Image (cartoon, rainbow, N blue to C red):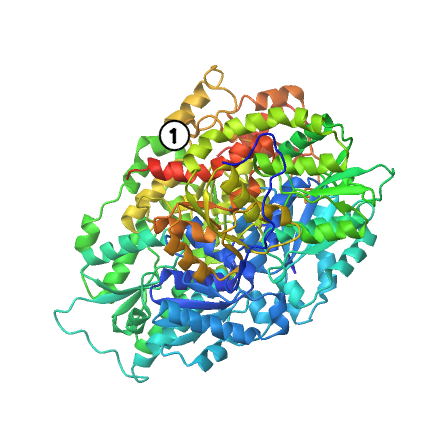
Amino acid sequence: MQLTVWTYEGPPHVGAMRVATGMDGLHYVLHAPQGDTYADLLFTMIERRDRRPPVTYTTFSARDLGGDTADLFKSAAQNAYDRFQPQAMLVGASCTGSLIQDDPGGLARALDLPIPVVAVDLPAYQRKENWGAAETFYQLVRTLAGPSAPAPGRPRPQRAAGVRPRCNLLGPTALGFRHRDDIVEITSLLAKLGIDVNVTAPMGATPADIAGLGEADFNVVLYPEIAGQTASWLQRTFGQPFTKTVPIGVSATREFVEEVARLAGVDASATLASASTRLPWYSRSVDSTYLTGKRVFIFGDATHAVAAARIASDELGFMVVGLGTYSREFGREIRDAAKRYDVEPLITDDYLEVEAKIAELQPELVLGTQMERHIAKRLGIPCAVISAPVHVQDFPARYAPQMGFEGANVIFDTWVHPLMMGLEEHLLAMFKDDFEFKDGTVPSHLGAGHSSPVADRPVQVSVSESNIAAVWAADAEKELHKIPFFVRGKARRNTERFANENGVATITIETLYDAKAHYAR
Amino acid sequence: MNVHVQGCPVVANDLPKPVRRESGQREVFCGLTGIVWLHRKIQDAFFLVVGSRTCAHLIQSAAGVMIFAEPRFATAIMEEKDLAGLTDANDELDRIVVQLIARRPDIRLLFLVGSCPSEVIKLDLSRAALRLSQKFSPAVRILNYSGSGIETTFTQGEDACLASLVPAAPPTRTSEDQLLIVGSLADVVEDQFIRLFDALGMGRVQFLPPRNTAGLPEIGPNTKFLLAQPFLADTARALEDRGAVRLAAPFPLGVEGTTAWLRAAADAFGVAPALFEAVTQPYRIRAERALVRYRDLLGGRSIFLFPDSQLEIPLARFLSRELSMHLVEVGTPYLHREHLAEELRLLPDDVALSEGQDVDLQLDRCRAARPDLVVCGLGLANPLEAEGMTTKWSIELVFTPIQGYEQAADLAELFARPLVRRAKLVA
């Protein structure tokens, strides 16, 4: 058993729901008890979808367990077919459904429906949401596109001269972080290169579209967590190469354009020359000077976390002090990236462990999920959301992609906004004794009522500190409070560490400035 | 409008009303969701769900994806090795509880909450609670109940939780009759009722659940209890097993319901009618006055209630009698005929009642009727709005203080607001 307060990922059948809900003409019949219908509200409330997810639950109850739950499944599947007339059906069980071992796949086959029925067996006690989405997508593609696969070993036919290259966009699902807008951005970027999109899947695709995936020349993998397995299979089966670069950030987008152009056999130079994004200039503008070396902690799904670290470090001039993911399947990618920034990778799905790490590192900005948003709020640290799991406000009304050149603009804004403006920070430092710049001032745009920072309070991080904590002398404590609050937490922590490491029992003003000199950067 | 401030007993018919029974796909939360309000109510209690990742995901989604940075609930997620018998699930549970109590030394009462998977694999949580109680007593009391979706719907989780508290409550120490109010009420509502009972001269009133573990009510044959919620069948039975006596009454929603509910207690405790009249009249008049505006807004409008919280029957009674709304269909996940007898009598003769749910069929009926307002769960609300219907999330009715005189207009406001909003929006 695992003790969990909050969880980053839902169960694997929620991943299957994300695939089904993203698609059209597909219906998912799920052998599940009554409470499992809660998952509907993820889509209708959090993502504000205007339709119920295309899922029928059998809703079995305790008294059904003595009787025939298999019949319950069959009638639910038959009714769902009659009512919704889908092109294909997905069948499976939730965690409790799998315990009663009714075999939804076999039962559905017995119904002999006139459509393809794909059974997905998702081990609910081993796997999680993203894995469930990946597996479901893979099984759907195998079943629906498999029949049109060429004979093994036959080379991919050459594209006729004058025919524009075509690719598939793979990976976007319902409830994904900005997937809706990423698709638009990447589709238009590809169009500029003269590349058409054959199918975008799962999001927006029908089962018939899935059957035609093999017609594209290559695949663009937007979200490796969901599409990686499918892309590998398509490469083996249809000889379609796929992209490795995820176009989040300016540099990654440029590399992506080059990679795609290579796969499509087109010239990228015109597109690259004309590409415009404000991030590089905004980053160079004088107001951004204050961003230099800001200590940032990053946590999320592996794709977004790795991309965020690169942007933070190379495109915004931050210092990455922590990098982690809850996607254990992508531990290697995170470890590789962490090496680049010389930080300890944090691979965990324990929210409390992430919280302890953030408290320990005292970053000046947190880039994370909804969970980190709450951690950061409690610690009084600015935060921007970069990855699922997310809240309703992370499905904005406006166009807000993360990918491509426009995505880079969006990222500049959303990461920098929680911080103070450069000028504001300078003025606060210069006029900190002025009555208008009171102690504990928060960024002006956050306004009154925003929780005041608690970052300067001593933080109990862990019991690992063997030294006895040094005590602050009154005048040193007073001096500490003359330091602007947004660096005070770090100053306090550094001073205490310095005192402990040097066997100082009482922290004086001298200790404070000794530590400041020691840690000067 | 046929409610009288005088509050004379309402003559209503006693005919059994026909009930449509449906079973099929439901759109109702399971009993685990009760944790979301129970952990705010019992302030030193912690709820440990023994379940799957789905349970953990449900609780945090139902809690609006982390409203609370430091919640007093968690999940012990069962893994493959627990199911395959590679580890002893009981040892694992003990390990988790030790870990949890070490982390949260403020816990005084720990509920082990059963879920669908723990029920299906028959993990005996009552034995675990006993075993762990011996280990942690007296610092921590450990109880168990089931909130599983195969056994409970939404608010029945509270019922199961409160029922598990009853055996832990001490016996009464006096022979005098004592009043017990049963069902989670917002603290502000509790305080209002305490003032009213004081004014009626009824002595000490106890509440279940208490705000703190130390405040568990005394229960014995001289306990007379009033249900504050219509979904407490098991709790009532457990109290009756201890000799306590239920006072039959409508539920304290709206002016009429609150008056009848208070009257049931007052009559049982021999409060003189004149005193009852004198004490309640100013409250009734004030609440009536506050309701007038809403009667203008809501009167004559039609409403369809999907089954969700089991509050539907008393709500329907309030909406039809005090706000003159037309009831198209009143659905409830489960209908306790005895506890709701006083409510059913007050519903119009031609009311369409339904128990259980087959959501697709019910949606068909709702679409055909095109009611002015639909009360439904979160899974259905936005899709129905997109179809041009106006909806009220039923979960808000559970989380908002709606009982008693001072809240009668707040309750009406919950129904009026979606209609007012729809009328305002032009784009």
Q: Quadrant of the N terminus of chain A?
A: bottom right
Q: How many marks?
A: 1
In the rendered view, tell whether residue A76 sits above or below residue A451: below
Q: Position of residue B110 (x, y in %)?
A: 72, 49
As drawn, A461 above or below B387? above
Q: Position of residue B361 (x, y in %)?
A: 44, 62
Between A416 and A24, the residue placed more toward the observer is A24
Q: Amino acid at mark 1?
A: Met
Residues packed near mark 1 inside 10 Å, few (<14), some (14 to 19) or many (20 plus): some
Q: What is the x, y in percent for residue B349?
A: 52, 50
User: With A275 as the anchor, is B217 left or right in this view?
Assistant: right
Query: Which residue is rendered at x = 66% and y = 72% of the image?
Result: B84
Q: Nearer the viewer, residue B325 or B123?
A: B325
Say which residue appears at 33% left-offset and 84% top-offset. A152
Q: Is residue A490 visible?
A: yes
Q: Nearer the viewer, residue B36 or B291?
A: B291
Query: Where does residue A235 sit, x and y in percent of width and height?
Result: 34, 73
Residue pictured at 45% horizontal, 30% vertical: B293
Q: Is residue A389 visible?
A: no
Q: Quadrant of residue B86?
A: bottom right
Disc 1: host chain: A
Q: Tell me the element at label 1.
A: loop
Q: Which residue is mark 1?
A: A421
